[in-house]
Image (spheres, rainbow, N blue to C red):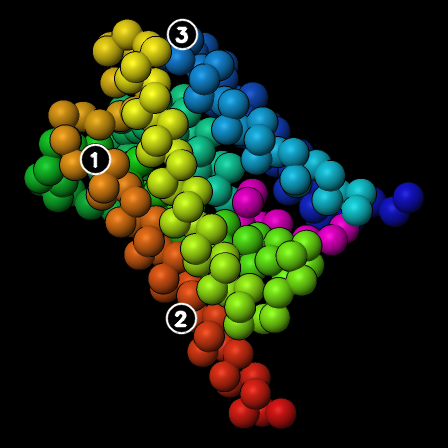
Amino acid sequence: MKIDKTKLTLVLLVVIISIITCINHIYPHEQILQHIGTILLLVPLSIDIFRQRLPMSAFAGIVCFTILHVVGARYIYSYVPYKEWAVSLGIVDDGFFQDPRNHYDRLVHFSFGVLLFPYFVHVCRKWVRQQPLVAVLMAWLMIQTGSMMYELFEWMLTIVMTSESADYYNGQQGDIWDAQKDMALALLGSTGMFFYYILRSMMTRKRC
């Protein structure tokens, strides 16, 4: 069975980054729950190394999203020092970031709508056998459904876990509208991709 070397390299990159982010845990008690998502994301990537059914756009999207996730998992999202990184690299000065809230989780929710959109389009076209435009619409709906289900999962954690542990995982940072804002960002990202796919389809038809 032929192995796609490019995809294998990308998966190995994800695994190496995941291992590095797990060295000298900052929040060791939260890592198991955080990396359940990592394992779930690695499953379709690992399978596709051999089956080679995913287009590179879908495969690369999952890879990028997984990397964003494992970085967030190390710092339980709420404490990713992106502000310090930006200042130390000279990208911005010390006074650039005025908002005390850590917005890394917002980036990941937005990225969920953008980076995983090609994968869901592929699923709808190949597995559900939908027409191209219907597949794009279904992918958009799947993003919203997935975002909602994840927020419900976080809500369930607040019932079965201690308030401190649930807050560590959920990363609300005191914002009572955190869930709604997270879903809105996934909606925004996926809507941008929705129109991108529609416009691309229209341009393709004009060329034909």
Residue of label 2:
195
Q: Give the farthest residue toward the right.
A: 1
Magenta span contains residue 187: no
Q: Residue 9 falls in which quadrant of the image?
A: top right
Q: Is residue 70 above or below residue 62?
A: above
Q: 140 or 95: nearer the eye?
A: 140
Residue 88 image point, x, y percent? 26, 35
Sequence-earlier tag: 2 or 1: 1
Q: 181 or 134: nearer the eye?
A: 134
Sequence-earlier tag: 3 or 2: 3
Residue beneath the point at 34% across and 11% down: 160
Residue 94 image point, x, y percent? 13, 37
- Badge 3 crowding class, 10 Å Cα cut-off, few under 14, some 14 to 19, many 20 or more, is few
The amino acid marked with disc number 2 is Phe
Q: 90 or 137: nearer the eye?
A: 137
- Dot 1 falls on a residue whose secondary structure is helix
Residue of label 3:
29
In front: label 3 or label 2: 2
Q: Is residue 36 above or below residue 102?
A: above
Q: Which residues are magenta?
A: 52-63
Sequence-earlier tag: 3 or 1: 3
Residue of label 1:
178
The amino acid marked with disc number 3 is His
User: Which quadrant is home to the C terminus?
Assistant: bottom right
